[in-house]
Image: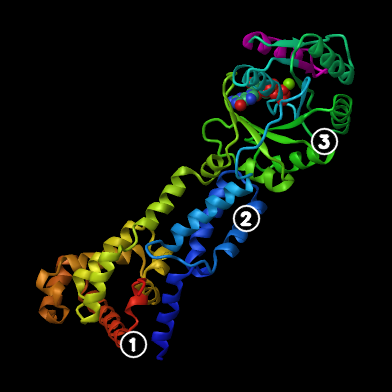
Amino acid sequence: LSEKLESAFKGLKGQSRITELNIASTVKEIRRALIDADVNYKIAKEFTDKIKDKAVGEKVINAISPGQLMTKIVKDELTDLMGGQEAVFNAKGNPAVILIAGLQGSGKTTFSGKLANFLKSKKGLSPLLVAADIYRPAAMEQLRVLGEQIGVDVHIEPDNKDAVSIAQNAVKEARSKNKNVVIIDTAGRLAIDEQMMTEVANVRAAVNPQEILFVVDSMTGQDAVNTAKAFNDRLDFTGVVLTKLDGDTRGGAALSIKYTVNKPIKFVSSGEKMDTLDVFYPERMAQRILGMGDITTLVERAQAQFDEAEAKKLEGKIRKNKFDFADFKAQLEQLKKMGNMKDLLGMIPGLGNKLKDIEINDDAFKGIEAMINSMTPAERADPDLIDTSRKKRIARGAGKDISEVNNFMKQFDQMRDMMKNMNKMGMFGKMMGMKR
Ligand code: GDP
Ligand code: MG
């Protein structure tokens, strides 16, 4: 085998299996999407490395490009990582006790109200809200107002400075009033704080909750990891609530937290209205983190690959050494649909490797197109027809130098020679990515 052929052959192998090379740009794109979505940087890297390991060597079946397959692998993996299916939320008990913990401002009080509303209207339960934030009178008032708004009783003891006894009294009240679920809204601090942790841990020990929910602001993307870890070490919580998932927030915190503490995310909440609480669906979050736009782009690119009929036609022409400028132009059209040239060269069956050596960039492609456009149909169909005077005319039409036309013609000839050689070796099936 000549060196040229050998390297071309290497390029071909990449078409039937995912290799480091043909997914390098996809992996980079995924990592960027994750970081844009506020996934912790280190986790984004670990995740994409893992994905890459998993993907490399995967067989690319006919009519699916490595990029397309990759997208699927990523979405599945992301969904899996975040729990696969929706998590179980346990609100059974007599009464069931649910403890809410998190930093100040994370949205605990708002979430407590939303959860009470959700359990009341969607699950037919009768909840009791408990104001156990003893440090700020305003916090108790805030919960009282929310309770009134949704028609749920609120247990308040304005003069009691002991969160543990407030919680215990509330459970007693719930029993006597036939409330079957108690939601305890606790105090938070601006940062992780020993006193706060001890207090929540004591409440926990006193009332034995079915669920301990850690509330975290999804806009604190990168910090969320440390906070979640500190709370989990101390409380061993049963689930995570992601708040403020409004508007553009991509929710990368969901992935970071799940990855770090491996606890299920149970609810997501957005907006300040009481009815904006949702059960957490991993698949939806995976799509959100990847950005619907990004995933659509990836899939669209993959779909713009050469279709089989087109490839067969091309194969026939190459087999008869009839590959011409019209075919070349059709290939360019396909390429253009797929986006950035440099990123995509590796994906083109056979041609990719050859063109890579020539270092063609997007602008150069425009020039090439202009030259082909300046050819007559007869010239496109029969490149050998193009003599010096025709070259001059083509150069003028394309606004190029005659030397550029010469260069292009030379490259095109080389490509055809290569194809001819490969033809002799019977490598076309593989080259066009078709099964035999
Ligand atoms: P806490 O200190 O943890 O009890 O947090 P709060 O429930 O008092 O919420 C802090 C602030 O965030 C308040 O102004 C809330 O109205 C607001 N907030 C809470 N949850 C959300 C949410 O999901 N979306 C938006 N946009 N704001 C929220
Ligand atoms: Mg509060």
Q: CA distance from mark 1 to mark 3?
A: 67 Å
User: Which residue is rendered at x = 88% and y = 21% of the image?
Assistant: 164
- Hey, what amino acid is under mark 3? Leu
Q: Earlier in the sequence, mark 1 or mark 2?
A: 2
Q: CA distance from mark 3 to mark 2?
A: 27 Å
Give x and y (percent) for residue 390.
11, 76
Q: Main secondary structure of the magenta part?
A: helix
**Marks 1 & 2, CB-CB < 8 Å contact:** no
Taking the image as shown, residue 102 lies to the left or right of residue 35, namely right
- Mark 1: is the Cβ under 8 angstroms from ligand 1? no
Up/down of 134 relative to 52, above or below? above
* Callout 3: SS: helix
Q: From this viewpoint, is residue 185 visible?
A: no
Magenta extent: 130-150
How many residues crowd around disc 3 within 10 Å: few (fewer than 14), some, or many (20 or more)? Answer: many
| Residue 241 magenta | no
How many residues crowd around disc 2 within 10 Å: few (fewer than 14), some, or many (20 or more)? Answer: many
* Callout 2: SS: helix
- Hey, what amino acid is under mark 2? Phe
Q: Which mark is residue 425?
A: 1
Q: In this figure, which residue is indicated by the disc labeled 3?
A: 235
Q: How many marks?
A: 3
Q: Splitting the image into four quadrants, where does ligand 2 fall?
A: top right
Q: In this figure, which residue is indicated by the disc labeled 2?
A: 47
Hey, which quadrant is residue 197 in on the image?
Answer: top right
Give x and y (percent) for residue 418.
31, 84
**Depth check, front residue: 265 or 288:** 265
Up/down of 363 relative to 223, above or below? below
